[in-house]
Amino acid sequence: MEETNHVTISELLHEGCARLADNSDSARLDAEILLEHVLKKARVTFYTRGADPVVADAGKHFLQLVEQRQHGRPVAQLIGRREFWSMPLEVTTDTLIPRPETELLVERGLVRIKPQSTASVLELGTGSGAIALAIARERSAAAITATDVSEVALKVARGNARRLNIDGICWQQGSWFEPVRESCFDIILSNPPYVATTLNGCSDAAVMHEPSIALFAGPDGLDAIRAIIGRADAHLHAGGWLLLEHANDQAKVVRSLLADLEFSSIATYRDLSGQQRVTEGCWKQATAGSAIGGEGDSYD
């Protein structure tokens, strides 16, 4: 379909799905989201108003986006946003696209931070700000700091905070603990890069459009996790918790690294697809009346 004059919504959607069929496992959904973005109409209207015509410029724009999706560009980057924790977040090529499985890290953080708590929370490698913003929305009394080595990524995070009217997060630029070298926290969370560099160039095409600094972490993908665990003790109060997202096949090693540094109550949790996704550990012994949660659960 080269000409988009007099094309209807249904015909355009059909064309988009056909073009994406060999490049996406969710061709129909991708096409609907892209057309929703172009037409500024809710997707439900595609079923009730499918015979409506689409102006030529809009049809051309849609097919251009479809072509970029065919080449592996993530839908979130094409439309400039991604929903996380029911929040619409701006994403760019300078930030990692928030994944649904990362919501498990937020869930575990909320378990460790009591409602109305003034606990101090640190997120390392915040990117678009997804995790820090989700925690801040649910635990507004907590004192939250979020760091990232990329000032461009922090600009995106700050913008998301403004659009969502979430105040009070301290955004700091620098690598891991550098911006907070003199500070201690009750909770430290991170979704660090954990893809092995040996997979660079062989991974999912969509992933390859994201910043490599947010994806790759040494030959076994554990460089960033080792760096965080190795310095976390100096930045945690007694009874504080460290929570880390990681790959499914890294869970055992992450638990071992925490145990080697004398973290206790170490536990791994599975995401909705059954993958071992988040591991946490407690630094020293929790004190009575602590603002943070209790011991970890068992793991498989």
Image (spheres, helix red, strand yellow):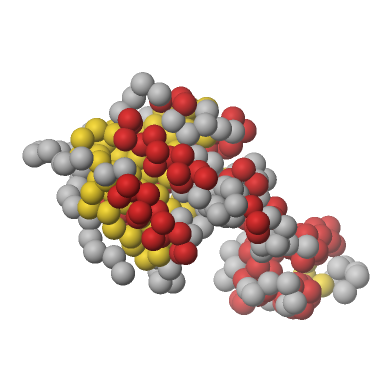
Query: Is the residue 43 above or below the residue 241 in the image?
Result: below
Q: Is residue 122 left or right of residue 21?
A: left
Q: Of residues 201 and 185, which is closer to you in this image?
A: 201
In the image, farthest residue toward the left:
288
Please tell me which residue is depicted at 59% across the width and 33% down the height of the picture. Answer: 150
Q: Quadrant of residue 214?
A: top right
Q: Can residue 140 be seen?
A: no
Q: Of residues 54 and 149, which is closer to you in this image?
A: 149
Where residue 223 appears, as percent x and y from the top left, is 52, 45
In the image, farthest residue toward the front:
260
Please tell me which residue is depicted at 62% across the width and 55% down the height of the picture. Answer: 76
Please tell me which residue is depicted at 19% across the width and 47% down the height of the picture. Answer: 293
Query: Is the residue 135 above or below the residue 28 in the image?
Result: above
Q: Of residues 99 and 205, which is closer to you in this image?
A: 205
Query: Is the residue 292 above or below the residue 253 in the image?
Result: above
Query: Is the residue 128 above or below the residue 208 in the image?
Result: above
Rendered-image quadrant of the C terminus? bottom left
Q: Can residue 156 be seen?
A: yes
Rendered-image quadrant of the N terminus? bottom right
Where residue 2 appears, as percent x and y from the top left, is 91, 70
Q: Is residue 287 left or right of residue 52?
A: left
Please tell me which residue is depicted at 40% across the width and 38% down the height of the picture. Answer: 230
In the image, farthest residue toward the top:
182
Q: Is residue 204 left or right of residue 191?
A: right
Where residue 202 appears, as percent x and y from the top left, is 70, 62
Where residue 265 appears, as percent x and y from the top left, is 22, 52
